[in-house]
Amino acid sequence: MDRYAHSHRPATPLRRVHEGYELATGPVASKDLLTTRWFLVLGVEFELALGLALLSGVLPKVTWFVALLCFSGFTVITGGGGNKQRSAKF
């Protein structure tokens, strides 16, 4: 999963399947609930299902709203970790 962390390519369903495979077969450093293997696998599967729903156009308003909530949650969970790394360099 780390090799895709800074990728500028768009997320595709095939990449999500590959991430799920890596989570199932590779080592995972689980420190808390958000880093346990089962939680990460569920997250990847949810992203895959949400991406397929967005691409297929099933219930577009509901799917768009769920995607908005999902990515807002990702923003809150990460908490601006990139800003902390940049400020440490100065």
Image (cartoon, helix red, strand yellow):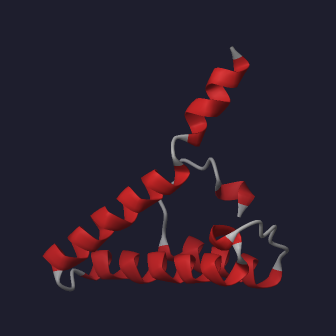
Give the residue drawn at x 31%, y 65%.
69
Residue 38: x and y in percent read: 66, 84
Closer-to-camera residue (52/75)? 75
Residue lying at the far front of the rendered structure: 32
Along the horizontal axis of the image, is 2 left or right of 9? right
Number of numbered discs: 0
Q: Image point 64% across, 53% down: which residue? A: 5
Quarter of the image with the C terminus is top right
- In the image, is 39 to the left or to the right of 58? right
Q: Nearer the viewer, residue 67 or 31?
A: 31
Q: In the rendered view, would you say 1 is above or below 55?
A: above
Q: Position of residue 33 (x, y in %)?
A: 65, 73
Picture quadrant of residue 25: bottom right
Instruction: Tell which of 10 and 38 is nearer to you.
Output: 38
| Quadrant into which the N terminus falls | bottom right
Residue farthest to the right? Answer: 27
Left or right: residue 83 versus residue 68 is right
Image quarter of residue 85: top right
Question: At x 31% / y 68%, what residue is drawn?
Answer: 67
- Position of residue 56 measured from the top left corner of the image (x, y, whole percent): 27, 82
Q: What residue do we see at 63% from left, 69% from top?
A: 34
